[in-house]
Amino acid sequence: MQTADPWRVTELGGGIVRASESGIRMVLPCASSDAYSDAQISDYATRADFSNRPPLRLSLCARFQGELKGTAGFGFWNHAFMPGQRSFRLPQALWFLFTSRENDIELARGVAGNGWKAAAINARDWRFLALLPFAPLGFLLMRSRVLYDTLWPIGQRAIGVSEAMLDKGLLRERRRYSIDWQAGLALFAVDGEVVHQADNVAKGPLGFIAWIDNQYTVLTPQGKFKWGLLAPPGEQSLELSDIQITGAKAGCS
């Protein structure tokens, strides 16, 4: 890990972080399914460095390029896990998240398990901790469609999952994304238009992160779990500019 003021840069496998004319470009030139590749910037080195709490606003301009395979996004999280690391925390996040079709993280009822989303999770909520001992039984019950429709909304609220699908066409265009993180809720907007509101959100502190990698995950209420690595057919990248973590509104040129 190296430092590129004000961001900490992580380059794993074939991942590269470059300065571009308009900002920062995170690139996977030729990732392989044999190794984890990640190009990433963050505002922390360890969890002790987390400093982001509500009320605040994240605002930035973003554009993706290439045939995206893996995951990518930007926002705030509690560094719940990283490939190759043994530590794990129950996840908390507020972010714009892309997952390619190989992924299936189907935690929000009625929302596809992959795609381009505005998403929040707050699994450290007391309601999830209370249900955690019953998770093995819950996985079995969720295999019944009737029980899934009846019971999963309770589980979804307990883990604080709230998601909204976004048009994948936005990925190729430079757009202004923002997250207004307030006490008890978060507003996600694209070009100033609110696209999602999450009500059960983390209190913080969380760390800022933006990344693009070649991993995929399958995780469903029915207990399916799988993790692996992908080999994109060519270069893929995430370009960010005008990153602001303030209380001020901003436009995108």
Image: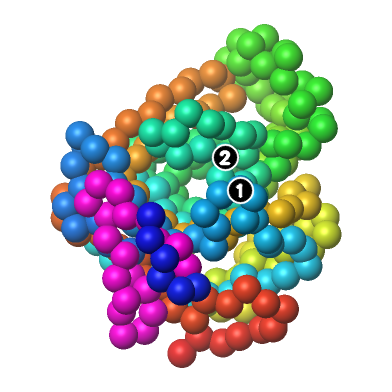
Question: At 71% from the left edge and 54% from the top edge, which residue is drawn?
Answer: 205
Q: SS for tag 2? A: loop
Does residue 169 appear in the picture of this structure? no
Tag 2 near tag 1, CB within 8 Å: no
At label 2, which amino acid type do we have?
Ala
Figure quadrant of residue 23: bottom left
Answer whether residue 16 is magenta in the image: yes
The percent coordinates of residue 195 (x first, y second) are: 63, 65
At label 1, which amino acid type do we have?
Arg
Question: At 69% from the left edge and 83% from the top edge, which residue is drawn?
Answer: 248
The percent coordinates of residue 44 (x first, y second) are: 55, 58
Q: SS for tag 1? A: helix
Q: Which residues are magenta?
A: 7-25
- Mark 2 sits on what residue? 80
**Vertical position of residue 176 compared to residue 155: above or below:** below
Does residue 233 appear in the picture of this structure? yes
Secondary structure mostly taken by the magenta-highlighted segment of the chain: strand
Tell me how far mark 2 sits from mark 1, CA to CA.
Answer: 10 Å
Figure quadrant of residue 238: bottom left
**Vertical position of residue 182 compared to residue 205: above or below:** below
In the picture, which quadrant includes the N terminus?
A: bottom left
**Vertical position of residue 59 compared to residue 208: above or below:** below
Question: At 72% from the left edge and 70% from the top edge, which residue is drawn?
Answer: 56
Relative horizontal placement of residue 233, taking residue 123 as reference (left or right) = left
- Mark 1 sits on what residue? 47
Local packing at callout 2 (Cα closer than 10 Å; few below 14, some 14-19, many 20+) is few
Relative horizontal placement of residue 8, taking residue 213 as reference (left or right) = right
- Choose between 52 and 100: the one closer to the eye: 52
Question: At 64% from the left edge and 34% from the top edge, which residue is drawn?
Answer: 90
The percent coordinates of residue 57 (x first, y second) are: 68, 72
